Amino acid sequence: MQQGIHPTYGPVVFRDRSTGWTLLTRSTLSAAVGGETVEVDGTTYPVVDVDVSATSHPFWTGRGRVLDAEGRVEAFRRRYGAAAAPRGRS
């Protein structure tokens, strides 16, 4: 590896803003963090705040929307009417 061209790779804590859940891992983002730190198990680490994680994403929490496929088809038919019907060969 060439010296001086690679970003620093070190421990960093990712924190979900909405749930407060934290994950201690290693990343190159530790050098780019805005200076905020958090203490985990008696050691201080830089922290990166994320908007969505597995603990707050609607798909993983079961709070996702259920789309009404039949209603969408009917809305399409109302909007485009007979023009959307397939034409047969003559």
Image (cartoon, grey):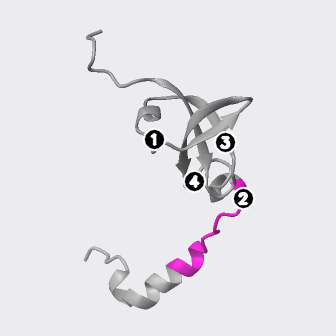
Q: Distance between the residues labelled 3 and 2?
A: 20 Å
- The residue that label 2 is drawn on is 62
Q: From the viewer's side, name the closer residue of 22 and 69.
A: 22
Q: Distance between the residues labelled 4 and 1?
A: 18 Å
- Residue 22, labelled with which disc? 3
Please rate how many residues cluster around mark 2, counting C-alpha atoms within 10 Å: few if below 14, some from 14 to 19, many from 20: few
Secondary structure, mark 2, is loop
- Residue 33, labelled with which disc? 1
Identify the mark nearer the N-term, 4 or 1.
Answer: 1
Q: In the figure, 90 relative to 62: above or below?
A: below
Left or right? Give the position of 17 relative to 88. Answer: right
Amino acid identity at mark 3 = Thr
Left or right? Give the position of 20 relative to 32. Answer: right
Q: Which of marks 2 and 1 is in front?
A: 1
Q: In the figure, 69 relative to 80: above or below?
A: above
- Residue 77, labelled with which disc? none
Q: In the figure, 66 relative to 61: above or below?
A: below
Secondary structure, mark 4, is loop
Q: Which of marks 3 and 1 is in front?
A: 1
